[in-house]
Amino acid sequence: MPLLTDIGTLVTCAASGGQGDITPVRDAALAWEGGRIRWVGALKDLPAEYHAWDRESAAGQLVVPGLVDCHTHLAFGGWRTEEFSQRILGHSYLDIAAAGGGILSTVRKTRAASGEELGSRAAAHLAAMARLGVTTVEAKSGYGLTLDDELRLLQVYRDLGTGPQRIVPTLLAAHTVPPEYRGRGDAYVDLVCEQIIPEAARRGLARFCDVFVEEKSFSVEQGRRVLVAGKRHGLRPKIHADQITSGGGAELAAEVGAASADHLEQVSNQGIERMREAGVVAVTLPFASLYLHVAPVRARRLIEAGVAVAVATDFNPGSAPSYHLPFAMTLACTLQRMTPAESLKGAAIIAARAVGLEDEVGSLESGKSADFAVIEAESVDQWLYHLRDNACVRTVTQGREIWRA
Ligand code: NIG
Ligand code: FE
């Protein structure tokens, strides 16, 4: 049974304490067996029963929980390179969308792609994420927008879920109104509530139900219908809220008891208060703020109000074309004014909470899944401060090594 020693610092990221409490342990050891953590603590306190376990060395490096990317749009067809320079030249995200670009352009490419193509591209992204220390990935549908195409994306996630990383599938059929329903948003919401949600739930293909509440997508009333229908079928609510305009999305998240409200660049003070009362996790997505050139989310205000703040990539071909979670964590520091410790906790145990897996992953504690990353850095501060291609030298998930530099 493996015992990792020579750990310079291990941060447990246990849930207790504030956003910045990551519980560092110097000169630590970590023992696991059958994919579960058996013991974690300072080497000098290691109980005798573990002394004979097979020792592996972390060479004095930093050990962190396997990272949890709690908001991605992992499977999609094509890219949207052309929109990058269009936005730089002043065309807004919503204008591009209104002209048939944006999400709908990816919907066309996704519908035209085969299931194998969607699956092999997503698998390649996942493999790249493993090299960065990411062991759990939430993955949304939302580029199909018909019953069959949404189920097809969820099926890609089911197939990928047999691989080393954990996949948490989310149905986002209410991402935007598809062209066939142009001007008939309510009729599309009927389809989502009466056919797509029930069928995805019946096949056990989704754990969460999400909706994009935004001017050009869905209203608060439509969002409520979708999330309530999802709940009736056992899907926990999540919501894309207050990203480009402030529209009561955070308040809706609190009302329906959502696991998380995501984006929140434009969240109101009242929305923050409602989220705190209801215990909704705020998922912040610094790549989306960066690429859409909007003011970043007020993470300090959220943290000071007592809302737990997660950090994720939002990986998608439009607003966030990167799966580099450690880079997003650095941006959460620089743009959102979170400390490195706060940012890490936001991509570990708080992100795990946002996907309902806080009892399983997101912290290094005995009984939890043996998911961890070895980082070539002397501290969390130094890791997220010194931006480079990849500081992760080893990734283990469920006790199995999936990456070694
Ligand atoms: O989270 N906001 C809506 N959905 C995605 C963007 C999707 C896209 O542009 O393709 C987001 O940013
Ligand atoms: Fe998103």
Image (cartoon, rainbow, N blue to C red):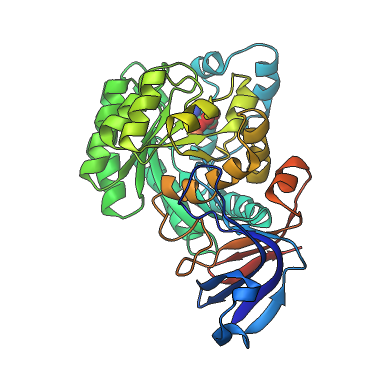
Q: Residue at x 58, y 58 (%)?
A: 65
Q: Quadrant of residue 164?
A: bottom right
Can residue 165 be seen here? The reply is yes
- Corner quadrant of residue 20: top right
**Labels in figure, total:** 0
Pick the quarter of the image with the N terminus.
bottom right
- Residue at figure coordinates x 42%, y 53% from the top left: 155
Decide if residue 397 is on the left or right side of residue 248. Answer: right
Query: Quarter-wise, where is residue 326 in the image?
Result: top right
Q: Position of residue 362 (x, y in %)?
A: 50, 55
331 sits to left or right of 304 = right
- Above or below, 393 against 51 in this view is above
Q: Nearer the viewer, residue 369 or 136?
A: 369
Outermost residue to the front: 44
Could you tell whether 204 is left or right of 42 in the image?
A: left
Residue 105 visible somewhere in the drawing:
no
Please state which of residues 62 and 21 is positioned toward the viewer in this rendering: 21
Q: Position of residue 69 (x, y in %)?
A: 54, 47
Q: Is residue 374 above or below residue 77?
A: below
The one nearer the camera, 288 or 333, is 333
**Position of residue 26 measured from the top left corner of the image (x, y, whole percent):** 67, 62
Question: Residue at the spot x=29%, y=37% of the render?
Answer: 257
